[in-house]
Image (tube, coloured by chain):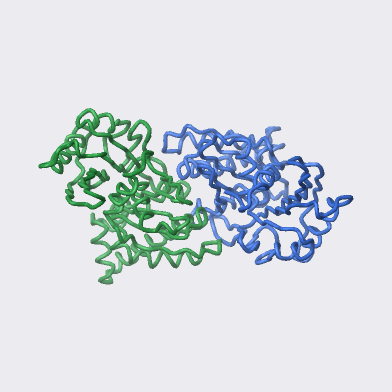
Chain colours: A green, B blue
């Protein structure tokens, strides 16, 4: 019997899962709390929780996906602009000392991309993008994966201020945080993206115009992805991906107008949704290295 | 004895080389002429020229690098915005019919990147960018290479018009063509980039200001490369790379201000310069496939 604990540590929520023989058997989900010691306490409690009635010696690994660039060798969270207080935290060391179980730390989008790849292994080049609190991304090319801070590629010189402190990053236009804040600036109402999409569907004029604009920005981002990576498959995941179908439609128009290569790939909404990361953990469970 | 013909088909110039036992023994260089049939005639003549006094049966392969996205399987030039008239030209078929020698067609930056990689095989991730008439690029990751239309990534929404007809592509700011045309628009003088750099070095006020701006744009492009690819090594090649040292200095300032990842890589000017492509041809000569 092989057990695995996998954790999705995101900007808004954290999910801790227990996996037995490659199947998710328990999953707990909670809001990511603010501050380093709080986050760590929460993580530890959640691990204890999924361990209830299981001998921890049976747990092969703890695999954590974090919304941050990661030093995989050290298990270090380098810079998590969307999770306050975690900069330069060696989460591997902390959890290994606590539980005496090997801990692997990866960028969340990289792990999710591997999850998507695990059910699409015939695909030569797969670009994964997740639209959540921030924008995460990873690219799988001929079985080799790397995470990419594509959300922080600049699409507008001196443009909107981003959480990374730069100006004009894609993330400053199409992330959940950006959408709420841009809508507030324009129309004075603080709404969740899902609410704005709802209003747009109900033909609210402001919301519709705003959603079209967001679709334009996403379209520019996806055009850049296509021109840069020429992927056979683009998978869109994250909290915005489902209600975001409405922006994807607009985005596809922009792509048709702007891509310069003879692109034959397609764009789909993730079927795995929040489980993509856990599929990724299962995919790399067997490998001795951190992943391809 | 193993012979190879390698051709660098660029927007401004073409170089045809004869390679014997992995060494370049003959090289001819000429302006790329306009129009499909002219280009093909020129290519054929150049091949005849390097074949003088050599039995063509001794030629193992003809390897062509083209400044265009390429369908490698078919040997098709898909779209060469900087070489007029070559769109959808099956250059492989044309030359194989003419010479009865196997022809391989690759994107030029991909071939150049492989050339740079051949002398840097300890490097895990190498980003190659060439600043010539246009902007070419390729990425080598864990020995796998892909070309990327990075020059056509959009850095400015509704920005400068590009040769690909889109607006705001990086190439519309930092290519040779863009530099000449932007300088002309600003100061009414049509100068080659090398001349503008010279003037800037001599402290001509306009030229200096212009070169600093170009450095800013290149810096944004390189920042995006760093955030997206996190490469251990960035190699800059192309006609602008040597006189462009002056813009690279300014660009590095922008990178320090704008990169969000803890980047440990470095940026160098290519040592191989125009021979990078031929090194790439030598590197893939032995392989039966088109390359990694």
The front one of A81 and A53 is A53
Residue beneath the point at 59% across and 44% down: B129
Q: Can you give x and y, in whole percent of width and height, for residue B132 in the image?
A: 67, 47
Query: Does B164 sit left or right of A74 as displayed?
Result: right
Task: Specify the farthest residue to the right.
Answer: B53
Relative image position of residue B149 (x, y in whole percent):
56, 53
Q: How many labels does the image show?
A: 0
Give residue A129's position: percent from left, percent from top.
38, 53
Instruction: Classify residue B24 as left or right of residue A132.
Output: right
A192 vs B98, nearest the viewer: B98
Residue A172, visible in the rendered structure: no
Q: Is residue A175 visible?
A: yes
Residue B149 or residue A75, whichever sits in front: A75
Image-quadrant location for residue B34: bottom right
Given residues A187 and A166, the one toward you in this image is: A166
As drawn, B266 above or below A283: above
* Name of the residue lying farthest toward the left: A53
A116 lies above or below A288: below
Determine whether, in the image, residue B26 is placed left or right of residue A146: right
Q: In this view, does B183 lie to the left or right of A172?
A: right
Quarter of the image that includes the N terminus of chain B: top right
Identity of the residue drawn at 23% across and 61% down: A195
Whole-percent x, y for residue B42 in the image: 81, 59
Work out which residue is located at the far bottom of the displayed protein and give it. Answer: A203
């Amino acid at each position: 019997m092989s057990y695995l604990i996998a954790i999705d540590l995101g900007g808004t929520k954290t999910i801790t899962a227990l996996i037995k023989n490659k199947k998710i058997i328990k999953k707990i989900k909670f809001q990511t709390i603010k501050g380093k010691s709080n986050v760590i306490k929460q993580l530890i409690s959640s691990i204890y929780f999924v361990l209830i009635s299981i001998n921890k010696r049976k747990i092969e690994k703890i695999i954590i996906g974090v919304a941050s660039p990661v030093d995989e060798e050290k298990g270090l969270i380098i810079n998590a602009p969307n999770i306050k207080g975690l900069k330069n935290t060696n989460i591997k060391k902390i959890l290994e000392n606590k539980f005496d179980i090997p801990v692997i730390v990866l960028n969340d989008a990289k792990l999710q991309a591997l999850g998507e790849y695990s059910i699409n292994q015939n695909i030569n080049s797969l670009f994964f993008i997740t639209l959540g609190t921030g924008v995460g991304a990873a690219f799988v090319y001929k079985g080799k994966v790397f995470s990419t801070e594509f959300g922080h590629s600049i699409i507008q010189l001196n443009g909107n201020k981003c959480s990374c402190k730069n100006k004009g990053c894609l993330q400053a236009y199409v992330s959940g945080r950006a959408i709420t804040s841009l809508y507030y600036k324009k129309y004075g109402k603080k709404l969740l993206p899902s609410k704005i999409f709802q209003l747009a569907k109900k033909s609210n004029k402001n919301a519709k115009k705003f959603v079209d604009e967001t679709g334009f920005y996403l379209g520019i981002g996806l055009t850049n992805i296509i021109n840069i990576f020429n992927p056979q498959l683009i998978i869109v995941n994250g909290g915005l991906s489902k209600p975001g179908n409405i922006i994807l439609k607009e985005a596809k128009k922009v792509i048709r107008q702007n891509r310069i290569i003879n692109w034959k790939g397609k764009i789909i909404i993730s079927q795995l949704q929040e489980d993509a990361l856990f599929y990724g953990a299962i995919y790399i469970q067997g490998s001795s290295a951190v992943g391809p």
